[in-house]
Image (cartoon, grey):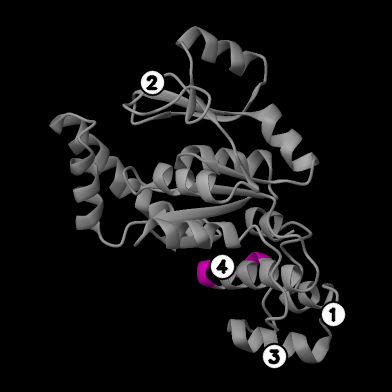
Amino acid sequence: MLRVAYDDPEGVEGRLRVSEFLTSIPAIGQTKCTRIMEELQIANSKRLGGLGRLQRRRLREFTAGWIADHGGTGDRLVVLAGPTAVGKGTVAGYIREHHPEVKLSVSATTRAPRPGEVEGEHYFFVSDDEFDRMIAAGELLEWATVHNAYRYGTPRGPVEEAIAAGSSVLLEIDIQGARSVRRAMPEATLVFLLPPTWDELVRRLVGRGTESPAEQQRRLETAKVELAAVEDFDHQVVNHEVREAAQKVVDLMRPRRGRR
């Protein structure tokens, strides 16, 4: 409901008062509602469609936490995205190795494998013709051209099957892809992975040595644009250290009880 209200402020959901939305949630009465709105710094007269960016984020995070605390199942579909070289693949790889209960979606891409990448584990490496066929057949949940070079996409079938089976699924994709997933599956939770600092992002990109100097510069220019998209995401995780960042992402998929 929140995403519909934010996308269409003049629609039925957008015109709903925040207090009416909160009291529609089980276990929240008028007294709790008043306290919650004070904590979220939202005026009683505010409607869902009229909230500012910071207020939207506070309400979205509160709602997800409350539902999980009171018997929810955690977020079944989490999308991990962020700027180039922030370490999305490394964090996702850590989750794959240390949290087998989380199903990682394997993307298809038209780029060549990097050293150490395994077909079917890190990516499905396909030709442009095969990628075109997958698009035409509706087999991709999302796809995008990244860095004006190669195409990446998420096969739809494995994601839908895992969710239907009750599993938690993690998608590690680019920012364009994350936006596409939100349109296709509004229930998805979007997590933005941030670098500790800009200098650290530059160090990581240059240090991995997989791009030419010209390509590195192009990716850094793209990263500046990508970082501006952080406000469109539900949660932010700073990748200071891989294990810690991975744990924060996994925690979003687990039931959380008893905090309120």
Q: In this view, does 107 lie above or below 8?
A: above
Which mark's residue is nearer the viewer, 2 or 1?
2
Upstream in sequence: badge 1 or badge 3: 1
Q: Name the residue under label 2.
A: 111
The amino acid type found where label 2 is placed reads: Arg
Upstream in sequence: badge 4 or badge 2: 4
Q: Mark 1 points at which residue?
A: 27
Identify the element where label 3 is drawn.
helix
Check the image and name the residue furthest to the left: 213
State which region is magenta: 49-54
The amino acid type found where label 3 is placed reads: Arg
The amino acid type found where label 1 is placed reads: Ala
> The N terminus is located in which quarter?
bottom right
Which mark's residue is nearer the viewer, 2 or 3?
2
The alpha-carbon separation of the residues under discs 4 and 2 comes to 35 Å
The alpha-carbon separation of the residues under discs 1 and 3 comes to 13 Å
Q: Mark 4 points at which residue?
A: 57
The alpha-carbon separation of the residues under discs 3 and 4 comes to 18 Å
The amino acid type found where label 4 is placed reads: Arg
The alpha-carbon separation of the residues under discs 2 and 3 comes to 52 Å
Q: Does the magenta stretch include residue 218?
A: no
Quarter occupied by residue 252? bottom right
Which mark's residue is nearer the viewer, 4 or 2?
2
Q: Name the residue under label 3.
A: 35
Upstream in sequence: badge 4 or badge 1: 1
> The C terminus is located in which quarter?
bottom right
The alpha-carbon separation of the residues under discs 2 and 1 comes to 50 Å
